[in-house]
Image (spheres, rainbow, N blue to C red):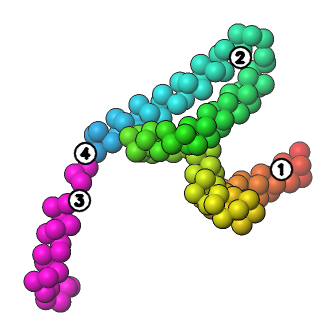
Amino acid sequence: MRERESPQSKRYVRLVEKEQPKVSLKSNLANAFLIGGGICVFGEIIRTYLLYYGLSNDLASVWMSIALVFFGSLLTGLGIYDEIGRIGGAGSAIPITGFANSIVAPAMEYRSEGAILGLAARMFIIAGPVVAYGLISATVFGLIRSVFR
């Protein structure tokens, strides 16, 4: 239980409640669905285009992933992906473009510190654990599959 609150802390709480933006759950869900779905539809358009021009399903999927990472990185570099993320919330973070954004954004932020200590060292601040755990789990899974084959 809280101790008696001072008048200053009560005023602070009221001020925070007044200034805090009102969040609409329905609006956030709709925006996340539309932005995330739009990114995925864009990826499927790329894949379908590649299939139409004769690539195999596996190869078209690989090139689609590469294209989405490229476009996510490009839009981050141009400052557009931040606005997409502001509107779409989690819908922009979940597809592969969000992963590209999580690598490019810190790299751009710290580029003034130099190529090694800024760009290279800070590039994987957010995405580094994902890459590390992905490599570790893929290695473990591969070893398990090779033993029980």
Highlighted range, magenta:
1-24
Q: Position of residue 20 (x, y in %)?
A: 23, 59
- The amino acid pointed to by label 1 is Gly
The answer, for residue 58, to whether it is visible in the render is: yes
Question: In terms of secondary structure, where does tag 3 sit?
Answer: loop
- The amino acid pointed to by label 4 is Ser
- The image's mark for residue 132 is none
Task: Kindly give the residue lying farthest to the left in the view shown.
Answer: 7
- The amino acid pointed to by label 2 is Leu
Say whether residue 97 is left or right of residue 65. left
Q: Which residue is mark 1?
A: 142
Lower position in the chain sequence, tag 2 or tag 1: 2
Q: For the residue carrying disc 3, how many other residues have a C-alpha within 10 Å: few (<14), some (14-19), or many (20+)? A: few
- The image's mark for residue 20 is 3
Q: For the residue carrying disc 4, how many other residues have a C-alpha within 10 Å: few (<14), some (14-19), or many (20+)? A: few
- The image's mark for residue 24 is 4
